[in-house]
Each structure stands twice: as structure tokens, then as C-alpha cells.
């Protein structure tokens, strides 16, 4: 019955999903594509005493553009309110070094039916910078510092006196502090080893722990076998960064001590919440003497001095350090567009949209931030056609909607190119992260990251036509698309996504779409998985659908376990107790409208085999190469589908180890030939050609 329901609804769903992306459902996007005459201008040649209505100064310099964003903001606010009209502010090409975060508030929301548009000069490059350029440097002359380096390295290191430039706030080496960039790329806080990791060989914390047979110690007191690390015992501000217990949880610690004789390292508490385990990996960093390769730097926070080994010749404006936390901030602002800017060099989130509605960030480049690229909330918000990279945390974080009432946010994250992120916070800093209700994530390309591509929580989200690859490369037991641990988060759809070349740290395996810890009611339809170690995973949940997907060289293709009946029974019991006592979890009344009406399956969740994965559908999938259920796949130690799964779930009509007759899968054409055996069993063609980013005049320029 459920399978029939999915199949009959699919043509209607497919129609809405496959509408050409260029025909946007968002009026703000359509408005952004129109050519509009600016009302005000901002220029490096401007003056805030002028009218701001001219793009360039008059020859007699009696009038011209504004000099500051703040002056243009105030002028736009007044005109929009007085004239009840839309306003366009154009910022002329150039490099703008901001001394403070540019802020918009509810006062800058134009009247209903109008918009305020901030845009960079069409055809130009407008860089809004939250850093300071370093154009004064010397070479090392301190004899105590010179003796730390080999002569050939020492002569290449340059020194910048930050304190003399008025830069005195350096933040912490833990992350979010001062960061050096050279020729538009983040440099490396000096570390050892330069690229690899050191392994924990034994533990001596004296507080043993045992997590389902995995043993470790709660205190960060352990041994290592590396001879060179032992020589760093005298470093005054040494830190370590490691995956201390699980492959998906990392933390940075200041070092309390290193005993060079016993090769014992102790970290400063607070200790890692999961503890420490033999075989886990870490590295040391924030060490002056470890500047031994091009691109490494160190800041002496006591003296206010930066040391740097430049990879190329230093030229004017080639070095910059981050100063501001955020570059552009909008709080409770509505009906405002931000278009065609480059935001870079800051210590936290580059662009923040906090609340408000009907805002648009389009065609922007967000790079070189120690936090996330864009952090947004509110409703009817759109982030479109942006390029985000070189980020310390995630790419785009979007929240909105009301989970108590299931009111959707109707937010859109579309056609963005996101890569090389999570440079500082290595895990749980997704390319795109969404929370709340009713957010659409479509046609994004996400790649080159140590952990997740997309992380989601909440209800009724739609994730479609995204391409994700080369993620989770420094972690295991992780998901390229991940969610977990809440029975009330339902109605999420993941369809027509292409996930490929995802293998995990040391090729030990991770997951394509990971429904962790009994997450339920997600629909996975028409996705393509290629060279993904464990492609789709139902971690003990119920009411999920894995239908009409293609798996190529995945092992296993499908995982379905019953953890709620075994090692995770405690979690099941906690949920049951909470629901039985109050009928409420996290303030959400799942036995009352709107939950009881929209998700009727919840009404029987306490009676219908609680903790057991029931009513999952795994049907009409294609498996080519690899292993369907992990049998004979080696690293997964046997079958990945629970032995009793057929008793409670529908697993049928899957094409396994039979040629499905693709047109040209090697070159990315996943169309099935008319004579395909998969089509005969009811498989629907996947619109693979619509996956990924697409050309649009509003896209960010390289």
C-alpha cells in the first residue's frame, strides 16, 4: 500500500521538482534580474557630504557618490519611507576596508511592496574586507628566535609587528582568532606534523571508560611514539587538535605538559566529552619553531608579533589578517537584496541575516572567513548563485519556520557552489545546514570537506538536485547528508541528488545519506550514488523510503539496523517515557494537531513495536558493482540489513547484480535504455541532467 502511494504520487512530485530552475518561484530573484537605475552610489572616491546620486565625482568636486555604506543606508532609509518606493544602492568597484561591521536593522526595511537593493557595480568587483593589510615587514633579527630555525629557513621568515599597527586583539588559537591570508588564501598556523597525524599509543589518565565495548579514558593523559613531538615540551602556547575517541568528534586543547622522557602528553581540561582512545589521531600546532614550510605562520600573543614563511614573494597588499568578526549583518530586516559583492577576511560568520523576511543574497562570493559564509534565519529568505570557499566552519546555515505549529519558512538555498570549508571546525560544520520547517535546498554543488555536505533537522524540508563529492575525507561513521535522533522530525524528502567519491578517512568508510539514531519518515527517491562506501543508512528508524535510487560501486548500498532493540534501547526508553508522561517532547505535542493530522503514523508509535524499525520501504533500486547489503564486502563484517527486517518492512523489486543498461554511466549519462530490466520492474527515469549548479546571470563571478 505504501509503495503504491509513492509510485502514484511520483509524477506530480516530479513535475514540481523538475521545473526549469531559471524560472524562479521567488519574486526577489525575478526582481534581481531586472536592470534598474541606482538611486544612490558609494565609491572610494566619494564624500559623505555629497548627494550620493552620481556614480563619479564632478570635475569641480562639488557633488558625487557617498564614501560610506552607512551614509547610503541612511539615505535609502529616508527615501524609502518618505516616497514609499524601492531604492537601489550601487557600490562602485574597489577594495573597501571596513573598520566596523556594516549593520542594517528593522528601520531599514522598506514599506510593503517595495525593496531595497544593495548591489556591486555590474561588471566590476566590489570587495568588502574585514581585515587589515600588512605592508610593513622585516626579517628575523632576534638571536633567540634565529636559533630555533635552520639558516636557510630563517632567512625566508618575515616578521610583522602587529602591535605597532594598533592590532592587539588576537583571539585564541582554539579558533576564531586572528588569521593570516596570503594572496587570497588562508595560511596554516604552524603545526607538527605538517600534513599527517600522530597516533595515541597508550592511556594513563586513570579514569577508564567503556562505551559498548570500546574502551578509553576520560582524562587527556596519554602516550605517543613520535620523537620530534617530545622536543616541543618548552613551547609556551602549544595546542593539540585531534579526533580523540570517535572518528566524527574532534576538539582543540591547550597542552598542559609534555614529558619528553616518557613521551606523555597531558592536555588542559575541560577534557573531550567522549574521552580518549588508543589509535586515535592528533597533531600539535601554534608553535613558533614549527614554521618549517612555506605557508606557515605563528603569532606571539605576548609580544604582538607575527612570523610568516611566505610561499611566494611578498608584494603590496598580498598579506592580510582578519580583524572584524562579521562583515555584513542584518537583524529583523525585510525586503532587502544583497547582490554581487565579495565578502572576505573576518573571524566569524561573514554575512548574517537574523530574522526578517523576503531577503535575498545573490551572486556573491563569500570566502576567507573563520566562521561560516552565511548564517540566516527568518522566512521567505533566498540565497542564490553564491560562491563560498576557504571557510573555517560551514558554508550556509539556514533556519526558519515554527516546529510547534509546522509553519514553513519557505526559505530557499539554490545554485550555490560551496567547497573547501570546515578548515577550523572539522566536523558538524556542513556545506549547507538547515533547521526548522519547510526549507528547500536545490541545485547546489558541495565538495572538498572533512565532514558533512548537508546537515538537516526539522520537518518538511526538500533537498534535491544537489551534487556532493569528496566530503567526509577526514572522518568516519559520518554522512555526506546527515540527520538523526528525533522521532518528531518528519516529512523530509531527499531526491535526485548525486553523491559520488565518498570513502571516509583512510578509506575506512562513511555514509552517503545517513539517518542516524532512529530518525524516521524520510523519503530518498531517485538519488544516484557512485563510489560511496555505505550509500544509504536507516539507523533503526521507521517509515522511511529508499525507492528508485541508483547505486554504482557502493558497499553496502543499503543499511538497515535495529539499534532501538539493542545497544540504543536506552534512547528508545527515554523517548517512550517522555511521551507517555507528558505527550510532549521538546515542547512539541506530537499527539495533537497539527502533528497528529499531518503525521498520523505518530499516533501509534508507542504501541507499534517501539524501538523496532517498521514500515520502511526499500524497493525498485538498482545496484551495480559493490555489494547490495554488505555481504562479502569485507570491512562491514557481514550483512548490513537486519535479519528480521523483512518481517516488519517492505524490501522488494530491487535490481541487484544485473546490467541495468545505462546509456553511458561512465561519462555521467544515467538514462536507462528502453530495454532495461529496471524499467520493466517499474523504475522511473532519473532527471540526472538537472542535477548540480546551472548557468544564470545572477551567479557569482569567479
Image (tube, rainbow, N blue to C red):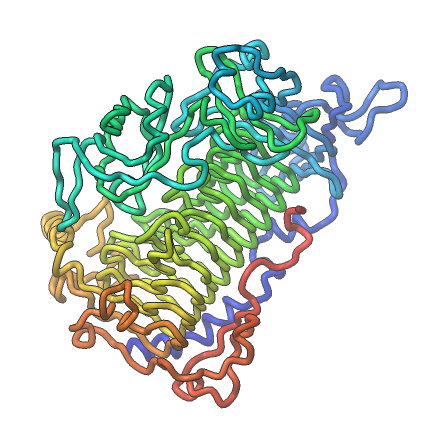
> Residue at position x 30%, y 53% from top?
477
Task: Specify the quadrant of the image occupied by residue 6.
Answer: bottom left
Observer-nearest of 328 and 476: 476
> Which residue is painted at 25% across and 76% down in the image?
650
Q: Is residue 503 above or below residue 170?
A: below
* Observer able to see residue 616: yes
Side of 588 relative to 526 (left or right): left
| Residue at the spot 37% in from the left edge and 51% down from the top edge | 505
Image x and y of residue 13, in percent: 45, 70
In the orientation shown, which residue stands out farthest toward the right? 59
Closest to the observer, 216 or 270: 216
Q: Is residue 355 visible?
A: no
Give the number of callouts. 0
Residue visible at 51% across and 45% down in the picture: 420
Question: Where residue 141 sits in the image (x, y, percent)?
Answer: 57, 11
Q: Quadrant of the N terminus?
A: bottom left
Q: Position of residue 17 (x, y in %)?
A: 50, 66
With 633 as the anchor, is 418 left or right in this view?
right
507 and 538: which is toward the camera: 507
Using the image, determine if residue 36 lies above or below residue 521.
above
- Residue 216, by quadrant, is top left
In this rendering, position of residue 28 left or right of residue 63: left
Position of residue 321 measured from the top left corner of the image (x, y, whole percent): 56, 25
Amino acid at each position: 500500500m505504501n509503495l503504491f502511494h509513492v509510485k502514484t504520487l511520483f509524477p506530480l512530485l516530479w513535475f514540481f521538482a523538475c521545473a526549469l530552475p531559471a524560472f524562479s518561484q521567488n519574486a526577489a530573484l525575478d526582481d534581481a534580474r531586472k536592470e534598474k537605475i541606482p538611486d544612490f552610489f558609494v565609491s572610494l572616491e566619494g564624500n559623505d557630504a555629497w548627494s550620493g546620486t552620481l556614480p563619479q565625482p564632478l570635475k569641480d568636486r562639488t557633488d558625487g557618490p557617498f564614501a560610506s555604506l552607512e551614509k547610503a543606508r541612511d539615505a535609502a532609509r529616508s527615501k524609502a519611507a518618505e516616497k514609499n518606493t524601492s531604492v537601489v544602492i550601487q557600490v562602485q568597484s574597489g577594495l573597501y576596508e571596513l573598520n566596523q561591521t556594516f549593520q542594517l536593522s528593522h528601520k531599514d526595511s522598506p514599506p510593503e511592496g517595495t525593496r531595497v537593493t544593495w548591489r556591486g557595480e555590474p561588471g566590476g568587483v566590489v570587495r568588502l574586507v574585514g581585515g587589515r593589510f600588512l605592508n610593513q615587514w622585516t626579517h628575523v633579527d632576534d638571536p633567540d628566535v634565529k636559533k630555533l630555525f635552520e639558516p636557510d629557513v630563517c632567512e625566508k621568515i618575515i616578521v610583522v609587528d602587529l602591535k605597532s599597527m594598533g592590532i592587539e586583539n588576537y583571539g585564541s588559537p582554539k579558533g576564531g582568532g586572528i588569521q593570516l591570508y596570503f594572496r587570497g588564501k588562508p595560511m596554516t598556523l604552524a603545526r607538527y606534523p605538517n600534513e599527517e597525524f600522530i597516533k595515541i599509543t597508550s592511556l594513563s589518565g586513570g579514569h577508564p571508560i567503556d562505551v559498548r565495548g570500546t574502551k578509553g579514558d576520560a582524562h587527556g593523559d596519554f602516550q605517543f611514539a613520535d620523537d620530534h613531538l617530545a622536543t616541543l615540551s618548552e613551547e609556551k602556547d602549544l595546542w593539540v587538535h585531534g579526533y580523540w575517541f570517535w572518528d566524527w568528534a574532534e576538539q582543540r586543547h591547550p597542552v598542559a605538559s609534555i614529558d619528553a622522557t616518557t613521551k606523555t602528553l597531558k592536555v588542559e581540561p575541560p577534557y573531550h566529552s567522549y574521552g580518549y582512545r588508543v589509535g586515535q589521531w592528533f597533531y600539535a600546532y601554534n608553535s613558533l619553531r614549527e614554521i618549517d614550510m612555506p605557508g606557515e605562520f605563528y603569532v606571539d600573543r605576548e609580544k604582538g608579533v607575527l612570523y610568516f614563511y611566505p610561499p611566494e614573494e611578498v608584494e603590496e597588499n598580498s598579506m592580510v589578517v582578519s580583524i572584524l568578526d562579521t562583515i555584513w549583518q542584518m537583524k529583523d530586516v525585510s525586503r532587502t537584496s544583497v547582490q554581487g559583492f565579495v565578502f572576505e577576511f573576518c573571524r566569524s560568520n561573514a554575512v548574517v541575516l537574523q530574522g526578517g523576511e523576503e531577503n535575498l543574497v545573490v551572486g556573491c562570493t563569500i570566502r576567507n572567513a573563520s566562521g561560516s559564509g552565511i548564517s540566516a534565519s527568518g522566512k521567505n529568505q533566498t540565497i542564490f548563485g553564491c560562491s563560498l570557499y576557504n571557510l573555517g566552519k560551514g558554508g550556509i546555515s539556514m533556519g526558519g519556520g515554527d516546529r510547534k505549529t509546522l509553519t514553513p519558512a519557505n526559505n530557499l538555498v539554490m545554485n550555490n557552489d560551496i567547497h573547501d570549508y570546515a578548515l577550523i571546525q572539522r566536523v558538524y560544520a556542513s556545506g549547507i545546514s538547515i533547521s526548522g520547517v519547510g526549507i528547500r535546498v536545490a541545485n547546489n554543488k558541495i565538495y572538498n570537506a572533512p565532514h558533512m555536505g548537508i546537515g538537516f533537522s526539522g520537518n518538511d524540508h526538500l533537498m534535491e538536485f544537489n551534487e556532493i563529492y569528496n566530503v567526509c575525507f577526514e572522518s568516519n561513521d559520518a554522512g555526506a547528508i546527515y540527520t538523526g535522533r528525533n522521532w518528531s522530525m518528519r516529512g523530509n524528502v531527499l531526491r535526485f541528488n548525486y553523491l559520488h567519491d565518498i570513502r571516509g578517512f583512510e578509506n575506512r568508510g562513511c555514509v552517503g545519506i545517513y539517518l542516524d539514531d532512529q530518525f524516521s519518515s524520510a523519503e530518498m527517491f531517485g538519488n544516484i550514488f557512485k563510489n560511496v562506501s555505505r550509500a544509504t543508512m536507516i539507523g533503526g528508524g521507521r517509515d522511511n523510503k529508499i525507492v528508485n535510487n541508483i547505486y554504482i560501486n557502493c558497499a553496502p548500498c543499503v543499511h538497515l539496523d535495529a539499534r532501538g532493540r539493542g545497544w540504543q534501547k536506552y534512547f528508545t526508553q527515554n523517548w517512550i517515557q517522555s511521551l507517555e508522561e507528558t505527550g510532549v517532547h521538546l515542547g512539541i505535542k506530537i499527539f495533537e494537531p497539527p502533528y497528529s493530522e499531518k503525521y498520523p503514523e505518530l499516533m501509534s508509535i508507542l504501541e507499534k513495536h517501539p524501538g523496532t524499525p517498521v514500515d520502511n520501504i526499500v524497493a525498485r533500486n538498482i545496484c551495480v558493482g559493490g555489494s547490495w547489503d554488505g555481504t562479502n564486502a569485507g570491512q562491514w563484517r557481514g550483512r548490513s540489513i537486519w535479519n528480521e527486517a523483512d518481517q516488519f518492512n517492505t524490501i522488494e523489486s530491487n535490481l541487484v547484480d544485473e546490467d541495468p543498461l545505462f546509456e553511458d554511466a561512465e561519462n555521467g549519462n544515467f538514462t536507462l535504455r528502453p530495454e532495461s530490466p529496471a524499467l520493466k520492474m517499474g523504475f522511473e527515469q532519473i532527471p540526472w541532467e538537472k542535477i548540480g549548479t546551472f548557468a544564470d546571470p545572477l551567479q557569482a563571478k569567479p
